Image: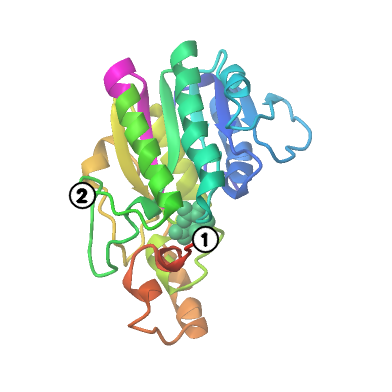
Amino acid sequence: MPAAHPTALRFRRLLLTGAAGGLGRELRTRLKAYCDTLRLSDIAPLGDAAAGEELQPAALQDGAAVDTLLREVDAVVHLGGVSVEGPFEPILQANIVGTYHLYEGSRRHGVKRIVFASSNHVTGFYRQDQVIDARMPMRPDGYYGISKAFGENLAQFYFDRHGIETVSLRIGSSFPEPKDRRMLATWLSYDDLERLVVSALTAPVVGHTVIYGLSDNTVRWWDNTPAAHIGYRPQDSSERFRVAVEARQPALDMNDPVTIYQGGGFVTKGPYES
Ligand code: 15L
């Protein structure tokens, strides 16, 4: 059930990339409330267009196709690309080249704001006994995290050079419920995801702001105080899942990098080439 974040602001046309993915499908139904037209893009099938939707498939590495996505768009929610750790080449094409195309198209077509789905994996090599904020140096935990670090740097450059505003969302774990002990700290409910994205779209002045995407979890590693101007107030907490999650995973291996580092399982992936 969509959370319907209260805002008087309404967009003429929003572009949602990665609209066929897990979070894309969730936001597809929710973002309709905030715009007249929702343009949806992905390389995977998008189904049929509902009222007020435009379907425009595009591969992010195809610069010409991405350019046409940005025509007559007020703002973008950019979820598209590879969303997990893996070999470098697909990540290079979809996340690094693709995000460059998105910003170049935005510059050419006068798009004013982008909400960029970055990831907690930009700082995945901080330890789980550290509380960090977005001003601390990046410590990516793989090629995927590095590609999101690139995206954040690209966002900063396009603001400094061209005045395009971005809110980079370092999303934690956005699923119906936390799947393991780590996610008790990193969980972002779908209703809070909607609140976060709408706050990022509608906050009056953002420049380039980086904010972590988590619910109001009792245990947490990320301090969003430097991004308080976004006005994001999470309403959910992972705490109601704690007993069940701990019963499923009663013991932790304290020598396992998955237990030690914030990035969890991502920190031990690869190498992919001999
Ligand atoms: C991410 O960035 C991934 O897209 C998602 O699939 C989760 O694995 C999440 O991070 C996480 O850290 O739990």
Look at the image and give the residue range highlighted in magenta: 159-171
**Residue at the image position 61 percent from the left and 27 percent from the top:** 62
Residue 163 in the magenta stretch? The answer is yes
For the residues bearing labels 2 and 1, Cβ distance under 8 angstroms: no
Residue 205 or 268: which is nearer the viewer? Answer: 268
Tell whether 225 sits left or right of 86: left
- Where, by quadrant of the figure, is residue 186 drawn? bottom left
10 Å crowding of disc 2: few (<14), some (14-19), many (20+): few
Distance from Cα at disc 2 to Cα at disc 1 = 29 Å
Residue 215 or 55: which is nearer the viewer? Answer: 55
Which residue carries the number 1 mark?
272
Q: Earlier in the sequence, mark 2 or mark 1?
A: 2
Which residue carries the number 2 mark?
136
The residue type indicated by label 2 comes to Met
The answer, for residue 133, to whether it is visible in the render is yes
Image x and y of residue 157, in percent: 31, 26
